[in-house]
Each structure stands twice: as structure tokens, then as C-alpha cells.
Image (cartoon, helix red, strand yellow):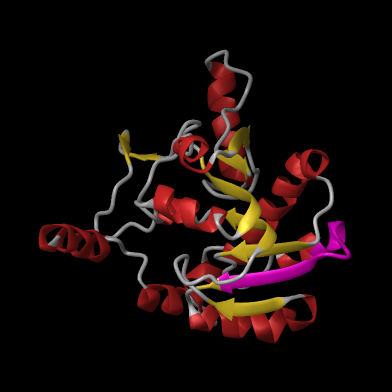
Amino acid sequence: MAKESEKDSIRIRMNANSVHNSDDAFSAGGSWEKHGGPEQTRRFARAFIAKTKRRMGDFASVLDFGCALGDAAPIFRADYPKLIYYGCDFSRVAIERCRSNYSAMGTYFVSSWDELDSFWDVIYCSNVLEHFDNYIEVAHELLTHCSTLCIMTPFIEQRAGQDLKPDGVSFHVATLRRNSFDELSATLNCHVQTLTLRVYGAWGGGWISEAASFMRRLLRGRFEMPPRQIIYICSR
């Protein structure tokens, strides 16, 4: 048991996604805003709703797990006006700013994945689980707090041609594939559906970068751009 605890301790130290680093990033003028985090949040939320709305229909309550500065709230409210929206993040700085900017649109609270104590129709988890090397454990716990868990992550993201892993510096520490959450089907008897997509102008570069990538593929005779995001809809 002591040996396992030591492994966990090393794993946590190797993961750059600490509360301290997150608080710094989400501070006013911090790296989250400098790198266009709020706009990425909005783009991901719009893409998610466009891709899933006909499959999911209406739902009464949603928890935006890892909500950052809450910029998905107005996107969800626009498409689901009767929605009861909740947002949580383990960064107190992020939650304070959510309450300041979007208090009329939802309820916000500080929580990690293993501290939740309520139940929602849907948990929306956008571009969060690639920050966890124990993403299966996190998803398993989230599914005990909802009827449907919607996970959105980068699709087969690699670094120098290798799958991601904690290195003490990088924030993305896991590479996700189509079958990454198949284990949930067996352990929780849930159905896992996957949808791939490309969210232009978000994760991986802006429009100029996308255009350059498209031209390179065109010159090689490849006309379709590969997906860079994947949605997992886990329903119990």
C-alpha cells in the first residue's frame, strides 16, 4: 500500500496541472486569457451543441465540469433557455471570476472531480480530461453524478510523435483515442458513443494555421482535414 501511495505522489508531482498553476493562469491577464482561452471555450461549446443537439434533445440541468471562466454559460443558455446551468472548477480564482461575470446565468462552485456531491442530467466536460493521466478514474466518478456524461477532448494528440504523459511541464498529459473510454461500458454498464470533429479557430491554431494546413494537404492530394477533437457521449 505504501508503495502505491508513493507512485501516486510521484504521478501528482509530475503533472503540471496544480491548483497554484491554474489560479495563476485564470487570474486577470493570466496565460488563459493571453492564449485565447475564453474564445476557445466558446468555440468548443458551440461545436459541441451543433454536433450533439439532435442526439441529446433537451435536458433540465447541466454541470460544466472544469468550466474555467464560465464562458460556455451564455452559449448553453442561448440554445437551452430553460436550462439550469452549474459550473465548477478546482481553481478558486476561476470560480470567483465566473460569479463576477456570469452570476445571472448559473451557479458556480469550487470542486475537484472527487468532491462532487450532487446529481445532474448531464455533465459537460470540455477539454479537461486530457489534463488527467487517470482520466478513466475521473470519468468513472463523474458518471456516478449524472445520467449522461459528455466528454470532449483533443483527438490523438501527440508530442514529437509520442503519446502524451506527465512530464512536470506540459498541461496536456494524456492521449485520447476512440476506445479510450470503452472500459466504462463494462464497469458501469453504459453506452459510449463517439463523434469526431474539427473545431476551426480553436485548439491547435487559428484560421491562418488551418488554411496553411489545408493547403499542405491539398498539395499532397488529401482533401479532407483530419478531426482534432472527439466527443464521447456516455449514457447510463
Task: Give the farthest residue toward the left.
Answer: 3
Coordinates of residue 54 in the picture (x, y in percent): 83, 39
Q: Quadrant of the N terminus?
A: bottom left
Residue at point 12%, 63% (across, down): 2
Coordinates of residue 18 in the picture (x, y in percent): 35, 71
Coordinates of residue 103 in the picture (x, y in percent): 74, 82
Q: Is residue 27 magenta?
A: no
* 42 lies above or below 188: below
Side of 172 relative to 61 (left or right): left
* 216 lies above or below 115: above
Coordinates of residue 35 in the picture (x, y in percent): 52, 63
* 216 lies above or below 70: above
Task: Give the farthest residue toward the top.
Answer: 221
Side of 56 relative to 29 (left or right): right
Say which of 135 and 221 sits in front. Answer: 135
Q: Quadrant of the C terminus?
A: top right
* Numbered label tally: 0
Residue at point 68%, 68% (across, down): 71
The answer to whether residue 70 is visible is no
Q: Which residues are magenta?
A: 77-88
Residue at point 58%, 47% (across, down): 152
The answer to whether residue 109 is visible is yes
Q: Is residue 81 magenta?
A: yes
Side of 157 relative to 66 (left or right): left
Residue at point 85%, 59% (across, down): 80
Q: Quadrant of residue 157?
A: top left
Say which of 208 and 203 sits in front. Answer: 203
